[in-house]
Amino acid sequence: MPEEAIERAVQVMRSGRLHRYNVVDGEQSETVALENEYARYMGVKYCLSCASGGYAMHVALKSAGLQAGEPVLTNGFTLSPVPGAIDNAGGKPVLVEVTDQLVIDIEDLERKIKSSGSTMLLLSHMRGHLCDMDALMAVLDAHKVRLIEDCAHTMGASWNGRKSGSYGLAACFSMQTYKHINSGEGGLVTTDDAELMARAIIHSGSYMLYERHEAAPGPEVFKTIRLETPNYSGRMDNLRAAILRPQLAVLDEQCARWNERYRAVEDALRGVNGLTVPARPSKETFVGSSIQFLAESLDVSAVPDFVERCRARGIELKWFGAGEPAGYTSRHDSWRYVDAQSLPQTDSVLSKLCDMRIPLTFSVEDCQQIGEIIRDVFEHFDD
Ligand SMILES: *Cc1c(COP(=O)(O)O)cnc(C)c1O
């Protein structure tokens, strides 16, 4: 947390004006300033800050016009707030396979667009891996499917020079502590669609104070929307906005620091027999805030033992293949409110998938050492 963020937080607390619409004459709230700055960062017209990433997805889906019972496509490998947001918005998740590169399988997507008749994809750029966005958009355009992007792991990333989150109708971001900027909890919705943003602002709990938003369409767009749109109360407050703004100012520098650390772990793991790290396409500018690899040559039953041996050497890996959901991770078959779906390819990938977060508190040397330890444990597993 930058010192500047702490100082601004104290100023907001001294003012007592924590609610985003509580401003004195001529004052711009921290929340409004954050929205303006993030819209500029993303190169989009509109931005809304809100309570969480999950809330951002819920409101984006509703504001895009999702109707009760409508099928919504999403990748079968993601975190539970994603199917949860679809459910909360009244949709029915249709799960799409992922490839061994951990991105959505575009062929399976096309099959499922046809079989489900869905016109909405909530794509989670899970663990920061971007699919071929040009190929994806071609398929979505051909079938008139709208895209909402879950950029919880791609804030700061881009594909072919274009920011992740600028491909879809709208994009959603999370500022929960484990993401790229941190206010404990928080979410952002960005879009160039005036009506979508007007609905999102009213949904978020603006009452009739929507004219205090700046990264927003003009009052004429709200004329009927303000009366037709339910208030789901999930606003951002000035305290959190105040601590996010100084972090946004250094986001790109932080992303570069993550990537230095990612490359240090990756260098140690590349070329290890039986262990594969997903390739990073040249068009992808990613943010390496976590790293994944497939323990291909291990028997699935041996993976927990491998993870345990890494843990004994001080390294905490997550395994996405575990039958029982644990910590933050769960597999699609644990989401029992979703109709059970068969995803053999995803299941096979997840059964060997290990994952590690890369906090910026680790030095590059720490990351080299971590990579070497993982390699050592893996190469001597059968000894
Ligand atoms: C964290 C996360 C979200 C949003 O989570 P919140 O905790 O609601 O902010 C959405 N998608 C993915 C993939 C995430 O990891």
Image: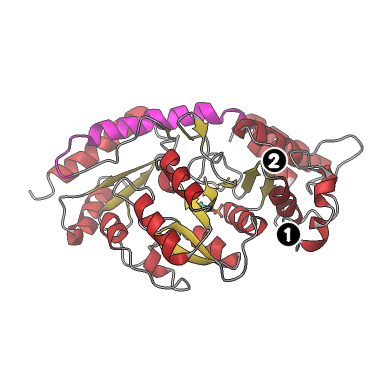
Find out if the beta carbon at label 1 lies less than 8 Å from the nearest ligand 1 atom: no
Q: Is residue 22 left or right of residue 138?
A: right
Question: Residue 72: image x %, image y %?
Answer: 51, 62
Which residue is label 1 attached to? 233
Q: Is residue 18 left or right of residue 337?
A: right
Residue depicted at 15% across the width and 50% down the height: 297
Residues shaded magenta: 249-274
Which residue is label 2 attached to? 46
What separation in Å lies between label 2 and label 1 (alpha carbons)?
19 Å
Residue depicted at 79% across the width and 56% down the height: 225
Tell me, yes or no, if residue 13 can be seen here. yes
The quarter of the displayed image where residue 283 is located? top left
Q: Residues within 10 Å of mark 1 (few under 14, many from 20)?
A: some
Q: Main secondary structure of the magenta part?
A: helix
Closer to the chain start, of discs 2 and 1, is 2
- Which-is-in-front pick, marks 2 and 1? 2
Whether residue 272 is in magenta: the answer is yes
Residue depicted at 59% across the width and 48% down the height: 184
Q: Which amino acid, by three-letter code, is at mark 2?
A: Tyr
Q: Is the residue 101 above or below the residue 319 in the image?
A: above
Is residue 379 or residue 114 the one in the foreground? Answer: 114
Is residue 296 or residue 164 the one in the foreground? Answer: 164
At mark 2, the secondary structure is strand
Tell me, yes or no, if residue 105 can be seen here. no
Find out if the beta carbon at label 2 lies less than 8 Å from the nearest ligand 1 atom: no
Q: Is the residue 332 above or below the residue 339 in the image?
A: above
Q: Is residue 349 left or right of residue 34?
A: left
Q: Is residue 135 left or right of residue 55?
A: left
Q: Which amino acid, by three-letter code, is at mark 1?
A: Ser
At mark 1, the secondary structure is loop
Q: Is the residue 71 above or below the residue 134 in the image?
A: below
